[in-house]
Image: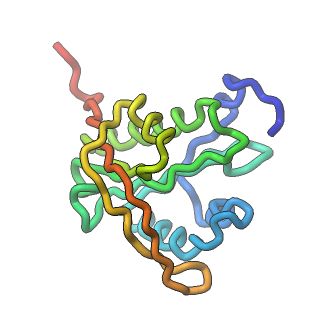
Amino acid sequence: MPSILMTDLIEQIIVRHATQADLLALEWNGTYTHFRRLYQDIYESSLRGEAVLWVLELPEVGVIGQLFVQLNSSRKELADGEMRGYIYAFRIKGDYHRQGLGTHLLRVVEDDLRTRGFRIAVLNVARDNEAARLFYQRKDYQVVAAEPGQWFYLDNLGRRCWVDEPAWRMEKLLADSRIKDV
């Protein structure tokens, strides 16, 4: 990573919605190629207003982070289209960890959910990812339930891949910025 001071890095970063052209960059040079069809499906759901795909872009470098939000889901305890939005696929490239970028991106996404009228941000964190759970707790997320973490996707070759990643469901009450204390 180029030597950039943290404050300079935050000032340079662009937080924006992902475009079709970003989907290849979300594969992170082959690390997530197996999610190619999944990313395309999520992108198409964003065009229908069911999801929002966010990216962190560093000029001259490209996409260095991502975060997806499901606005409505068949699992209403995660995303119900009105009150609860589900945050997932939150990644920052390794060279950019511990520089405030995750906090910055999460703040932007939470503000967007508030603007849309959502009151609760929901996410799952792998039970064996203690560092991530502690990060979310520092951001006022609380563990509310255990999740089995079992799901599947079709990989880039069309094969069904099963995921078994037990998780903790965490929630944060989003203060409504439109309501002012009197």
Residue 129 visible in the picture: yes
Say which of 22 and 91 sits in front.
91
Task: Farthest residue to the front: give it.
Answer: 128
Q: How is the image coloured?
A: rainbow
Task: Specify whether 81 is left or right of 2.
Answer: left
Task: Farthest residue to the left: give it.
Answer: 182
Which residue lies at the image location 73% right of the left edge and 42% below the top edge? 95
Q: Quadrant of residue 27?
A: bottom right
Which residue lies at the image location 32% right of the left edge and 62% below the top edge? 148
Task: Specify whether 83 is left or right of 92.
Answer: left
Q: Relative to 170, say whether 7 is above or below.
A: above
Percent across and percent down for residue 174 are 29, 35
Q: Relative to 93, say whether 47 is above or below.
A: below
Percent across and percent down for residue 128 are 46, 50
Q: Relative to 100, say whether 149 is above or below.
A: below
Task: Specify whether 28 is left or right of 86.
Answer: right
